[in-house]
Structure formats: C-alpha cells, structure tokens
Image (cartoon, rainbow, N blue to C red):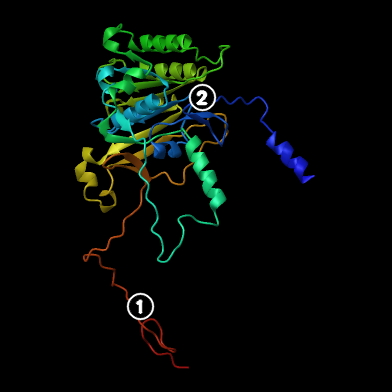
C-alpha cells in the first residue's frame, strides 16, 4: 500500500502548471513561478528566490547612483552568463559603455576545506558518503545564479556573443521616449517569439534593463512614469521576460505611484551620501548602505514572501557585493560603562529594600 502511494506521489503534477526547462531559470518552490537570478544571490533570497518571469523589479537609486548602477551591471552580467537576450535602455550614459563595464564571472569558486582533527584517518566522512554524492550532483547540475568579480571586466568575446538590443532616447523622438521604448520592447518580444500567446515553446528569456528612468535626460514630464510602468508590467505579464528599473527617487516628488506599478521595489541608501548621519553610528561601520524593502512580489499567490527581518544592509567587499541582515556589533571598548545609579544591595532576612530592620 505504501509502495502504491509513493508511486502515485511521484507522478503527481499540478493540473494546468507548465514548467519550461530554460537555461538560467528555476521554478519557485512557493508558487511554481519561473525565476531568474538578479546576479546577486543574497538579493535573490531577499525577494523570494529570484526575479519572477513576467515581473518588474524597481530599485530606488542612492543619491549619487554608485551602488544602483552596480546592481544593474550584476543583472546584465547574469544575463550574459546565462545567455539570455538583453534589451538595455539608458539616457544619462550610453548603453554601449555600460556593457563594456560588466563584472567578470567567477568560474571556479575557491574551496575552503575544514581543518582535520589530529590523528584523523581518511579524507572523507564514512557516515554521510551518500549525502555527499547527492550534494555534488546537485552542484554540478545547478546553473542558477553566479558570482562575479567586480575588480575585473568581462571579456569582449562574451559580450559580443550576447544577443543585445540597445535603446538610446536621444536617437528617438525626444517628446515620446516612453512610447518608443515600449514599442521597441514589444517588437523585440515578437521577433524573438517570447510572447506567451505564441505557438512556439520558449527557449530563452528577455532581460530588460532600464537605467535611471525618470532622470531629466529621459523626460521632464514625471507624470508619464506611472503610466509607462503600468503598460510595461502589462506587457511583461504576456511574455517570457523580466525587467530591472533604476529610478532616482530623490529627484522625483513622489515615488509611491512607481512602487505600486512595479512588482518588487527596494531602496538603496548609501552611507557615503550622508556621512554626518551614519558615520557616528557604530552599527554601520562595517557596511556601506541600507536596503529598504518597499514592496515584495505577490505573483500567483495570495501572500507574498516575507523575509525574517526587514532591516537589511549591503556591503561592498573586495570582489563582490552582498546583502546581509543588520546586526549590532558587540561594543567592547573601555569607554562602555553600565549604569550604577541604583545598585542592588545585599539584603539579609528581616531587612527591607531601604535597609530598615523589621521587628518580628
């Protein structure tokens, strides 16, 4: 009976659910949605495993766009490594210059073996030999997400081999840059046969990257931004594509409508933008900025993914960028002193807190 139940459970599939085997993607364990990596594994874990296909991730830039542009480069580098199709739009900087400055993928991760105990014989654990083989097989088959070295630039051969479409608003109609961009995205999806209504089975993903949307280089009409994002999200829902948009929120009157028109939204606050406020706080001395979660994706689900905490920080290490939970470091300096205003006195039986004896 148990054997029959196991056989049935192995052949169980959700009715109507279609999972396509596309390189660089994986299905979500929560809602069966196809996911792609943002290029930063810690960011993928923060938003529920990755960027859902058919969704849009909005990043509120830091003041000088130092780290938001780095997030965008990670997203593009992951697209090149996964051999996904790319559509890059930028107005403040030429799109071709952004592609030339992508970080190089780390092909061989350094291994740090655990130190052996004195007198230990053998190189492997004899108890967990089966689990070790399974872990090695999973690692060999996994192609979702990569690590990148920001100190090195991706080779020109890898970039030239990628299928990239560039969009520069200065070369289009300056009065209707958003309409021209929507038409370019729609035309690219149709040419690559990445629409969900098409008869062909998808074999690739289109990654749309928009840099500094809403800056004066794009348009002076900030009221057209919510309408553009709303139309863009509707277009993504009908295609095998994802989008990452960076927005200079400090230049806009209200970023709330843009957050509501996106599926996920985070805000980056760099400590270098306001050194007087953050430099004196010892909790921030090991990090470079804050990550404020504005909105989490809720696709094919009634409840969105909720992380353990909402307090996150990012740290730019020597070779990579990571997002971590904000924690308070222990303060072991000599200047730390405890309050001694109300010390606890030792009291014997028959005495009150004020030291007065009680006559029994």
Quadrant of the image occupied by residue 340: bottom left
Q: Is residue 25 left or right of residue 287?
A: right
Q: Residues within 10 Å of mark 2 (few under 14, many from 20)?
A: some
Task: Give percent across and percent down for residue 299.
Answer: 53, 29
Q: CA distance from mark 2 to mark 1?
A: 67 Å
Instruction: Pick whichever, 185 or 165, lies toward us.
Output: 165
The extreme bottom residue here reads: 360
Residue position for label 2: 22
Residue 184 sits above or below residue 316 on the image: above
Q: Position of residue 131 (x, y in %)?
A: 55, 49
Nearer the camera: disc 2 or disc 1: 2
- Residue picked out by circle 1: 344
Residue 154 image point, x, y percent: 29, 27
Query: Residue 177's spot in the image, x, y percent?
Result: 33, 11
- Give the residue at the far left of this rendering: 276
Secondary element under disc 2, as helix, strand or loop, is loop
> What residue is at 44 percent from the left and 11 percent from the top?
186
Residue 357 to residue 281: above or below: below
Residue 289 placement, left or right of 78 = left
Does 135 sit above or below residue 201? below
Category of crowding for the residue at label 1, using alpha-carbon neighbours closer than 10 angstroms: few (below 14), some (14–19), many (at least 20): few
Q: Front-most of 121 and 78?
A: 121
Which residue appears farthest toward the front when viewing the image? 122
């Amino acid at each position: 009976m148990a054997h029959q139940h196991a056989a049935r459970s192995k052949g169980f599939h959700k009715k109507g659910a279609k999972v396509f085997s596309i390189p660089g993607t994986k299905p979500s364990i929560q809602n069966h949605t196809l996911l792609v990596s943002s290029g930063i594994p810690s960011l993928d874990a923060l938003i529920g495993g990755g960027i859902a296909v058919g969704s849009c991730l909005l990043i509120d830039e830091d003041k000088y766009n130092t780290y938001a542009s780095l997030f965008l480069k990670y997203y593009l580098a992951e697209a090149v490594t996964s051999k996904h199709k790319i559509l890059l739009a930028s107005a403040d900087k030429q799109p071709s210059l952004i592609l030339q400055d992508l970080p190089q993928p780390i092909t061989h991760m350094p291994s740090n073996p655990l130190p052996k105990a004195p007198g230990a014989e053998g190189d492997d654990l004899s108890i967990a030999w089966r689990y070790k083989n399974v872990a090695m097989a999973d690692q060999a088959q996994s192609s979702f997400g990569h690590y990148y070295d920001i100190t090195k630039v991706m080779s020109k051969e890898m970039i030239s081999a990628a299928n990239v479409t560039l969009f520069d608003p200065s070369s289009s109609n300056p009065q209707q840059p958003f309409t021209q961009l929507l038409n370019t995205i729609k035309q690219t999806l149709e040419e690559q046969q990445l629409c969900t209504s098409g008869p062909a089975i998808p074999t690739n993903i289109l990654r749309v990257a928009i840099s500094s949307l809403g800056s004066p280089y794009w348009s002076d009409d900030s009221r057209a931004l919510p309408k553009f994002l709303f139309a863009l999200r509707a277009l993504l829902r009908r295609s095998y594509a994802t989008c990452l948009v960076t927005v200079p929120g400090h230049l806009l009157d209200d970023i709330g409508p843009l957050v509501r028109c996106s599926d996920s939204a985070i805000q980056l606050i760099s400590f270098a933008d306001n050194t007087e406020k953050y430099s004196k706080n010892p909790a921030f001395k090991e990090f470079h900025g804050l990550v404020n979660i504005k909105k989490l994706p809720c696709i094919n689900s009634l409840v969105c993914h909720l992380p353990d905490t909402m307090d996150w920080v990012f740290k730019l290490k020597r070779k990579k960028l990571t997002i971590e939970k904000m924690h308070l470091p222990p303060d072991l300096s000599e200047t730390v002193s405890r309050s001694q205003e109300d010390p606890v006195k030792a009291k014997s039986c028959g005495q009150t807190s004020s030291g007065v004896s009680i006559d029994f």
